[in-house]
Image (cartoon, grey):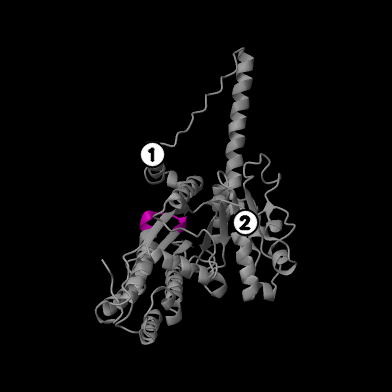
Amino acid sequence: MLRIIPVSSGKGGVGKTTFAMNYALALSRTHKTVLIDMDTGTSSLRNCLDAPVQKDLYHFLKKNARLDECLTPLGSKLDPDNVFRNFSFIASPRNFIYDVVNFSKDVKLRLIDGINSIDADFVILDVKAGIDYNVIEFLPFTNTGILLFTPKNKAATVTASEMTKAILFRMIRLIFQSTEVLNKHFPNINENDTTLFNELINLVEDGYDEQLKSLDDFLIMIEDEFPDKRFVHLLRHAIEHFRVYFVLNMFDSIEESTDTVIKPFVENIYSTVSDKVIIHNLGWIVRSEEIYRSTVDAIPYEIAHHYKKTNAEKRKTRKDSNLRTLLGLEPAKKPKKKIKSETTSEEINHQVDLLQKMYMNGAGNDPATNLSFITDRTLNISKSTVHRFGMRKIYTNEHFLGKFFNEMKQQPQISENSKSIIP
């Protein structure tokens, strides 16, 4: 089933496109994956991939091409052994085009429909840095997708927490936007209550009221004083089920990342948003000359590393075979392939092994291991019904509200008459 995962960052210069590209390639080893360059003001992705592009988002947005007609495979030059055959990408327009960068609501809906219809297991959206209307429309309602930041850019860390706040408040504003919307699902909502609630939410989002610095302050205030407890229940549910996912790029050490990234990021979310949101660290990518070199050469690290390793193994095999022939020995027998089983214990051992490699045996200094770890985390989280990661489809406001309120029916019921929670 399709899962759409946006990759975003608070600021440019943190390696977002490079990560998104290698992440998508790593996923494509086992799953059909499409990478889309959503930064329509530049064309970063095509500059990082030495693959000929026949059609891009320009042809979809301006020439009425289908989105699947704009898919570009790697080709034999980059992938001679067809290892990454499950990977394809959609490039943004080659040049800056005003009405493509600032597309209308109708064009945006058409693009959303196109993305939702892509035949793939994963669609990775490389959205532009920062946050504006055209970015947030392609982010999930209930989680952040993957936020990328680095110890090398402190401003990006602060902005990433601000993005978290913007995404969560977008959802809250949508849920409580009007009495008309609320009454479709919870009759007898009072217009004055809705107006008061939204005025208070404005104060929290602005962040200038010393009494309402965060959503937690707001919850404390309204739990006892707000007349309709259904508002409290809906807000608490939205906050407590919101998830933040991040990856550290250009990682050097746990100590540096803790002081310059983790601590300020968490503190800012807890102080300005809520300490009830759930934060997941998906892993890190170490600072690497190989990654930098591969970007310059327009050959992604994941591809370059694979063929470097494969060619070394082939040279070793040829050398061994030639030596055996000279000595008159029988060719070495091929080892039997171990048949994998999907037992719980083996999966646990696999995860423990990855953790040991990353944290114990120094393999955390290897970008290939980093990508493997993050990919494994993605696949496991995607299977879980507990985690909300990315999205099954890009929802319109109406579709999300229907989904959200249907989910609320699975929670403790809300009394229409007493305006309180039925235990």
Tell me if 66 is positioned left or right of 397 in this view.
right
Q: Residue at x 47, y 48 (%)?
A: 379
Q: Is residue 85 above or below residue 112?
A: above
Which residue bears the numbered disc 1?
Answer: 344
Q: Position of residue 156 (x, y in %)?
A: 47, 68
The one nearer the camera, 216 or 359, is: 216
Q: Position of residue 339 (x, y in %)?
A: 49, 30
Which residue bears the numbered disc 2?
Answer: 118
Q: Amino acid at mark 1?
A: Thr
Q: Is 182 covered by the magenta stretch?
A: no
Q: Residue at x 60, y 56 (%)?
A: 35
Q: Furthest-top residue in view?
A: 328
Q: Position of residue 368 (x, y in %)?
A: 51, 46
Q: Position of residue 263 (x, y in %)?
A: 35, 64
Tell me if 103 is positioned left or right of 215 in this view.
right
Residue 177 image-quadrant placement? bottom left
Q: Residues within 10 Å of mark 2 (few under 14, many from 20)?
A: some
Q: Furthest-left residue in view?
A: 224
Tell me if 154 is positioned left or right of 38 in this view.
left
Q: Amino acid at mark 2?
A: Ile
Q: Furthest-bottom residue in view?
A: 192
Residue 258 image-quadrant placement? bottom left
Distance in Å between CA atoms under marks 1 and 2: 32 Å
The one nearer the camera, 195 or 328, is: 195
The answer to whether any part of residue 15 appears in the image is no
Q: Secondary structure at mark 2?
A: loop
Q: Earlier in the sequence, mark 1 or mark 2?
A: 2
